[in-house]
Structures are given as structure tokens and as C-alpha cells.
Image: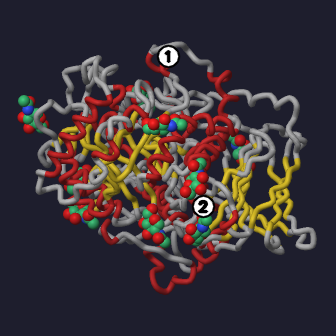
Amino acid sequence: MLSLVLCSLCSLMVKVDAGVTVYGQIPLALQTTASAADAAATGKVLPAYDQTLLSPPALPDPRPPTAFTLTLPAQNGSVIGLSIPQHGSFFGFSIEMSVINQILGKNSSHINVPFLNLMSNIHQRAGAIDVRLGGNTQEFAKLVDDSSIPNFAAVSKEKTNLKNPTLTPAVIYTKDLFYLVANITALVNVRCPTGIPFATYNGTGWSLEIAELGQEILGDHLLGLQGGNEPDLYAAHNHRPKSYTPADYFGEFGSLVKAIAEDDKIPRKNMLIGPSLASAAWTLEQVWDTGYINAYSDSLSILTIENYPNNNCAAQYGLGTPRDPQTEFPKYLNHDSGLNIIKPFLNSSAIAHAAGKPFIMFETNSASCGGFPGISDSFGAGLWALDYGLTMAAANFSGAMLHVGGQNVFYNPFTAPPTNQTLFHQWTAGAVYYSVLIAAEVFGSTNTSQILDTSNNGIFTPSYSIYENGALARVALFNYNNDASGASDITATVKVDGGTVPAQVLVKYFAGESVSVKTNLTWAGQTLGNKYEVDGRLKGQLDVKTITCDQGANACLIPVKAPGFALVFLTESPAVQDDTPPTTFATTAVTRMFNTATVDPAILATSNGISGKQRQKNHLGSTSKGALLAANGNAGSGLRTYTPGIFGLSLVVGAALIAMRVVVAGC
Ligand SMILES: *[C@@H]1O[C@H](CO)[C@@H](O)[C@H](O)[C@H]1NC(C)=O
Ligand SMILES: *[C@@H]1O[C@H](CO)[C@@H](O)[C@H](O)[C@H]1NC(C)=O
Ligand SMILES: *[C@@H]1O[C@H](CO)[C@@H](O)[C@H](O)[C@H]1NC(C)=O
Ligand SMILES: *[C@@H]1O[C@H](CO)[C@@H](O)[C@H](O)[C@H]1NC(C)=O
Ligand SMILES: *[C@@H]1O[C@H](CO)[C@@H](O)[C@H](O)[C@H]1NC(C)=O
Ligand SMILES: *[C@@H]1O[C@H](CO)[C@@H](O)[C@H](O)[C@H]1NC(C)=O
Ligand SMILES: *[C@@H]1O[C@H](CO)[C@@H](O)[C@H](O)[C@H]1NC(C)=O
Ligand SMILES: *[C@@H]1O[C@H](CO)[C@@H](O)[C@H](O)[C@H]1NC(C)=O
Ligand SMILES: CC(=O)N[C@H]1CO[C@H](CO)[C@@H](O)[C@@H]1O
């Protein structure tokens, strides 16, 4: 995509006392006085924190029925059109290479704790999380010697214009980048596809360092190596002559395959990813017609497409015709949006499946060139992204990755605070982070979930059924209508064919006050927090509704607010009731802290299964100055899972980690 990310190094360091250094976003000196309000940046609000609130679209006319019935077979055998088995990690993230430093961490010994927590939430539900490291800037990445980037950073964005034919590297990185990622994968099951610079191929030799170091250092956590990012835009971006065709790309890809075959430092030859078109100048079929899949079948592990359903390039970069967000908003708020996005790729999804290759939407989000103010981070976008993701899964895509840019995009699932605000702000999460989180629960961790689009009540109230290990396990229900009166709330009647409904079902709701809002979003009662409040943990009491079914009538009546989303658990899976905390993390840099004044003690008290009472009783996690919290000193062994039941085992560590998850985000 055309987005140019603006970011810079984050290098906050606060000396607390001799030998103790805390790397954090909230230095102790400022904690008691600084508030988000008085410390708010003066001047222009960056797009990632934009406050535009659009008007919710008018209700459809005629109004769709508010009640409908889904009669669902109990077993998968008789279900026509059910998807291939999907992984819990179906929905992941794609992180622009130039912002790795802001998002993942500064270097291998300074991992951002909020990032770990955000990944851990998904790992806990799905068993894994896929995070692509790449984007346009990967194409211009250049390895530099250890320690040659100032301030010990592993990655640095260079001042460059990606359209500049002189091809200045967009990103420089050291070998430590791979250790940074490896140290993350040692804590959370993150699987990373990345990419080989392709646009910068000079016709004679390839820069294969990313492939070499990736295989050496990331091992099995390296999910694949992209060969070309959006090659159909190379001509438009002046990376190739105007005459550049799919056949030319085919030839260059062959040269890459050959170079890898001849490189002893790349032992695994069969993990290339392509063609990753932007679906702009070429169709996937044009690439298939070159014989690409057959010719490179032994080298290709994943087939990919990248697509944004819309663009905001006029407002962001003065390119094309301006689009008014208010006019665009309704286009996202119905099931046809996702269906229309994937329509051009269904043939390729089937072709990939027949060839035994996964087909992945490698980079997507609400609109290219940064998304739209008011749309991309709204609750409506959260519903849209979840529906779009499930649509892809139902159509046999094997994965999809939501793109994460820098401070100047509207669509980020999560954003680290701007460098000059790390003193007083925490992270910000977009509504679409919840979409990925919820998708992880839709599919669960068995990797056997099969999904079917069961929408039968019009485009404003789509629905899906999910089979796990062959049996009907969950039902997903959307309501895109926006109506505070309650008159557009829906009731779905779920019936089981070839079986009977359980006596009761558990339901989790994704809730927001309207499709327009960006604040107070909750998943099963819990929230990450609003703008600048996110440390990566879900806060608040888990609220899973129990709905009693009528077994005589073989019917469960599930209400869904307008707007809203419900995930119905028909078999009481352990995950749904599970209020145990995800794994929590420390970084090597944190050895002591006190005074977590910016934390709401009520939230702390209910977080992670340890009550305030228990904490008081054990003199733990005091929020007052002077409480000494010891922490483990090694990121590689920083993995601690704890539950209320293991106090005897690791009381102190547990308390320290809770506090750190609140205040620490080493940059
Ligand atoms: C932070 O930097 C931005 C961009 O350089 C600037 O507009 C803003 O005023 C700065 N904010 C503070 C609080 O210094
Ligand atoms: C990471 O950066 C810190 C300084 O911020 C430095 O002390 C440390 O050695 C660096 N780690 C690596 C592995 O370069
Ligand atoms: C082409 O690129 C390769 C890899 O970066 C480099 O080793 C080689 O010297 C370059 N060749 C020319 C002619 O620039
Ligand atoms: C699917 O793609 C193949 C390969 O390019 C092409 O031959 C075929 O016509 C396409 N089918 C449809 C329905 O587009
Ligand atoms: C997905 O794959 C399954 C199993 O091969 C097939 O039955 C189903 O029709 C496919 N769905 C689509 C939309 O192609
Ligand atoms: C599910 O797939 C993930 C990769 O997405 C893998 O790490 C995990 O081990 C698998 N789980 C099971 C139960 O097979
Ligand atoms: C039904 O589910 C089982 C277990 O996941 C799987 O082995 C089987 O292939 C599925 N059958 C169909 C028709 O999808
Ligand atoms: C969020 O919810 C809280 C508590 O219910 C309420 O006090 C606050 O006004 C809400 N904030 C916004 C921006 O909706
Ligand atoms: C598990 C792992 O990959 N650990 C690495 C963390 O980073 C350091 C370098 O700072 C490596 O030496 C470790 O191997």
C-alpha cells in the first residue's frame, strides 16, 4: 500500500537509583501529577488518536426482521460448503517493518510489555498468533553491522521516499532484530512470516540476509519468506519499467528460487510466499497463468493476496478523488462488504486449496493510505473486520493479517504512544484489535474448527456456525443496525438438527454504545481501555451470559443488541469460563518499581484473578510508594503463568508482574 509511516526511535530511560533502571512510559517522577488531559499533546492530533465521531448511518428501509431461526446440523458430515479446518490464529497482524521498533521493542533486551500482553491474549485463546513483519518498507530493508544504529536500537527508519528511484534503504536493521523477535517467540507462540527485499533486486544478486538470519535465529517461528510485496505496483512506483508484467515477475521469482537453492545459509528452501499482489494492476489469475504455482510448487509454502477495500489517499497524500468518511461509513456496516472484497479471490482460494497451499490475505485493513478518520477505529469497524475475517475463513482462506502502521494511520489495531508522549501515555487499541481477539475464540485452539456462513436474515444481521472436532460448537451473530431504542435488537433462534439444544448456553458479547464510538468497547464485559490507557491486559470483570434454552422446543433464543455481536458457546468449552490470566511478562530492564499512581486500584484489584483482599492480606502489589517489587531478571525466562491457586509458589513474582503489566513498557 502507499502508506508512508512516520516514526522515530523511542529511547526513554529513567534512572531510579544506582543500578536500577526502569524503562517505561510513565516515569516515576511524573506519575502523581501527569494526567492524560493536562499532558495531551498540543497541536494537531495524530491520526492514530483521531477523535472524529461520525453519525451512525440511518436504519435500513425497510427494516429487516428482528427475529430469525438458524437450524444447524449437529455434526459436520452433512453440512454443505463447510470450510476447511481453520487455526485459532486465523486472524493475525501485519506490522510494517519500519515500525517494529515502536511496536515490538527497541532491541532484544527491551521488549515492549504491552505488545507481549496483546499477543498473549490471543495466544491464550488460539494457541498461537501470526504476526507478519513486512510491508513496503521491508522491500528496502538493509542489514547493517551490529551496534551501528544509534542508541542500541535494532531497527531504524531512514528518511526516504519510497517512490524515489534512488532506493535509499527505508529501514536499516541489525542482527539483533532477529534476536528481538526470537526473544518474543520464546515467550509467546508468535509465528512470523517476513520478506526478502525484492523491489530492490538489481538483476544480478539478491540480498538474502533476512532469509539467512531468519532461518538461523527464528527457527520454526519463521513462518515463511515473502518474495515480492505488491509486485503489480512496481511499475507504478518506479521500481521497474512501465512494461513490467506477471511474466517478468515470474522470471525474477525463478532467479530468487535459484539464489536460495545455492545459498547454504538457507537450509529450508521451501518457504517462499507469493505473489502478494496489491490486486491493483494485475489479477492473481494473470500470475497463475504464467505457470507460477506449478513451476515453484517445491519452493512456495503460502499463496497470498493483499487488499484494502477502499482508500483515503486523497486526504492523506493528495492522490485521487477525495472520499468523505461519513459517506463511506455505511459501506462497511453490512455483510456484503466482506463478501464483495473477497469475490475476486474465490477462484484463487480454490486454486490454492487444490494445489495444497494455504491462501492468505497477507495485508488488509479498512482502507489503504491510512484508513479513514471516524471509520477505521470505530466500533463499527470492529464488527466489520470480524465479519470480514469470518467471511474469509468461510471461503477457505487460511489466514488474514490486519496491518499495523505508525502514528499517521487511522486503522491500527494497536499503537504505541508517540515518542514525545511516552512520558505520560500508555498505548491505544483500535476496535479491530477486538476483532482479532474474538476471532481467536471463534476458532479456538484445536485447529479443527470449520465455519459456515449461515446468514439468512439479510446483510445487516449475518451469522455463522462453527464446528469443532466435527460437532456444532459455536454460533456467531452480528447486528450492524444502530438503534438505541432497542427496537432493532434481534433475537436469533438456534435449533439443532439431528440433536437437541443444550439446557443452557454461554454467550459472550462484543459491545459498544453505537457503531461510531471508539471508547468503552467491551468483550464479555472486559475492555483494554480507551485511548492512551492500554497496557495490553483486558480489565474489568469477565461477564459471560448464561441463556437457558427450551429443550422441549429444541430452541435457544439469543438476543443481540443493535449494534452488537454475540458468540454463543453450545458446548461448554473451558476457554469461555476461563478467567485465569494470560501469561504476564517482565522485561530484563525492570528490576524495581513503586508508586503506580496512574492505575485505578479497583481495576488492579479485580485483575488477573487476584483480588484486592488477597493482595492486602499478603501485603502484595501495594500501590503506594515504597513497596518493593522484585522481578525476574531474564526476558528469556520471564514466562510465568500463575493463578490464584499458586500463591505459595510465586507470590512475589506474581505481584510484581501484575504491577509491571500496568506501568511498564520498555521502549
Ligand atoms: C510531539 O511531537 C509532535 C510532532 O513533532 C508535535 O506536533 C507535538 O507538539 C509534540 N508534543 C509534545 C507534547 O511535545
Ligand atoms: C538495548 O538498549 C539498551 C540501551 O537502551 C542497551 O543498554 C542494551 O545493551 C541494548 N541491548 C542490546 C542487545 O543491544
Ligand atoms: C546487486 O545486489 C547484490 C545484493 O545486494 C549485490 O551483492 C551486488 O553487488 C549488486 N550488483 C550490482 C551490479 O550492483
Ligand atoms: C480461475 O483461474 C484460472 C487460472 O487463472 C482460470 O483459468 C479460470 O478461468 C478462473 N476461473 C474463474 C471462474 O475465474
Ligand atoms: C471450502 O473447502 C471445502 C472442503 O474442500 C468445500 O467443501 C467448500 O465448498 C469450500 N468453500 C468454498 C467457498 O470454496
Ligand atoms: C494449532 O496451530 C498452531 C499454529 O497456528 C500450532 O502452534 C499449535 O500447536 C496447533 N495446536 C494444535 C492443538 O494442534
Ligand atoms: C468433520 O470433522 C472431523 C474432525 O474435525 C474431520 O476429521 C472431518 O474431516 C470433518 N468432515 C467434514 C465433512 O468436513
Ligand atoms: C465510559 O463508561 C464509563 C462508565 O460506564 C462512563 O462513566 C463514561 O462516561 C464512558 N465514557 C465514554 C467516553 O463513553
Ligand atoms: C530465546 C532467544 O532467542 N534468546 C535470545 C535473546 O536475545 C539475546 C541477545 O540479546 C540472545 O543472545 C538470546 O539467544
x 52%, y 44%: residue: 413
Q: Is residue 513 above or below residue 356?
A: above
Task: Residue type at mark 2: give it.
Answer: Gln
Quadrant position of ligand 7: bottom right
Q: Quadrant of residue 640?
A: bottom left
Q: Alpha-carbon neighbours of circle 2 within 10 Å: few (<14), some, or many (≥20)?
A: many
Q: Along the horizontal axis of the image, is 91 left or right of 205? A: right
Residue closest to the far right: 552
Is 344 left or right of 488, judged from the image as shown?
left
Residue 95 or residue 473, whichever sits in front: 473
Q: Is residue 93 above or below residue 411?
A: below
Find numbered disc 1 in the image and state the secondary structure of the residue it sits on.
Answer: helix
Quarter assignment of residue 580: bottom right
Task: Estimate the x, y position of residue 367 in percent, counting from the top left.
Answer: 53, 30
Residue 490: give x, y in percent of width and height: 85, 48
Please tell me which residue lies in front, 283 or 137: 283
The residue tagged 1 is 314
Give 2 or 542, whichever is nearer the viewer.
2
Q: Is residue 622 visible?
A: no
Quadrant for the N terminus, please.
top left
Mark number, residue 450: 2
Q: Secondary structure at mark 2?
A: strand
- Residue 461 seen in this snapshot: yes
Residue visible at 11% across and 45% down? Answer: 145
Q: Judge by depth and name the residue closer to the eye, 356 or 142.
A: 356
Disc 2 CB within 8 Å of nearest ligand 7 atom: yes
Say what amino acid the circle numbered 1 marks: Ala
Colour logic: secondary structure
Q: Is residue 592 left or right of residue 324?
A: left
Q: Quadrant of residue 483?
A: top right
Q: CA distance from mark 1 to mark 2?
A: 40 Å
